[in-house]
Amino acid sequence: MTFANEPRTYKEASNGPHSKEWEKAIDTEYQTLQTTGIFKWVSELLERRKPIGSWIVFRLKQDEDGNITKYKVRIIARGFSQIPGQDFTNTFLSVAKFITLWTLIFIITHKGWELHQVDVVAVKSEI
């Protein structure tokens, strides 16, 4: 769900009344991308390479009463401009099948349990 007061651009976020909260969310997302090895700055591009653009998605997380609980930011690469084997070698996306989710929800409902949603922050580990 998109809320009317969510910024659509970095300029809107940095000039808005919650600019400090959005800057903190951007820093958190950037640190996560660096820690997990998904993102890194390069000083020079290799021959015949173009930089991959990105954009920022801003989302407000709210509780059931409509109070803001979190300022969430995602930095997203414009992947359609990438060339497999040249710009990336590995891809990963955790996916759950809908039948698995529906089964889990059925069991939770049948047992009268509570269901809570949480955000998981990935951390790269050195093994």
Image: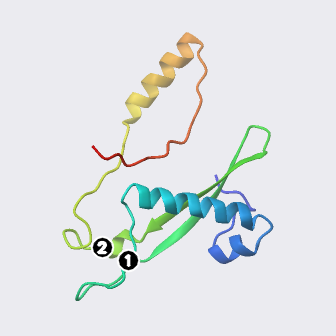
Does 116 appear above or below 55?
A: above
Pick whichever, 106 or 46, lies toward us: 46
Q: SS class of the residue under badge 2?
A: loop
Whole-percent x, y for residue 79 in the image: 36, 69
User: Which residue is pictured at 74% across the width and 61% down the height?
Assistant: 4
Quadrant of the rendering where the C terminus is positioned = top left
Label 1 element class = loop
Question: Reading the chain from its start, which is encountered first: label 1 or label 2?
Answer: 1
Q: Residues within 10 Å of mark 1 (few under 14, many from 20)?
A: few
Residue beneath the point at 75% across and 62% down: 5
Please provide percent x and percent y for residue 122: 44, 46
Q: Nearer the viewer, residue 57 or 123?
A: 123
Residue receiving disc 2: 82
**Residue 76 horizontal/vertical position (percent):** 46, 65
* Drawn side of residue 87 relative to residue 8, left or right: left
Cα gap from disc 1 to disc 2, whole angstroms: 7 Å
As drawn, the residue found furthest toward the front would be: 126
Residue at label 1? 52
Image point (67%, 63%), residue name: 22
Q: Position of residue 14 (x, y in %)?
A: 70, 73
Q: Nearer the viewer, residue 100 or 113?
A: 113
Residue 64 lies left or right of residue 95; in this view the side is right
Query: Total of numbered circles in the picture?
Result: 2
- Give amino acid for label 2: Gln
Q: Amino acid at mark 1?
A: Ile
The correct choice, above or below, for 105 with respect to 13 in the image is above
In the image, what residue occupies the spot 81% across and 67% down? 17
**Left-right relation of 122 to 3:** left
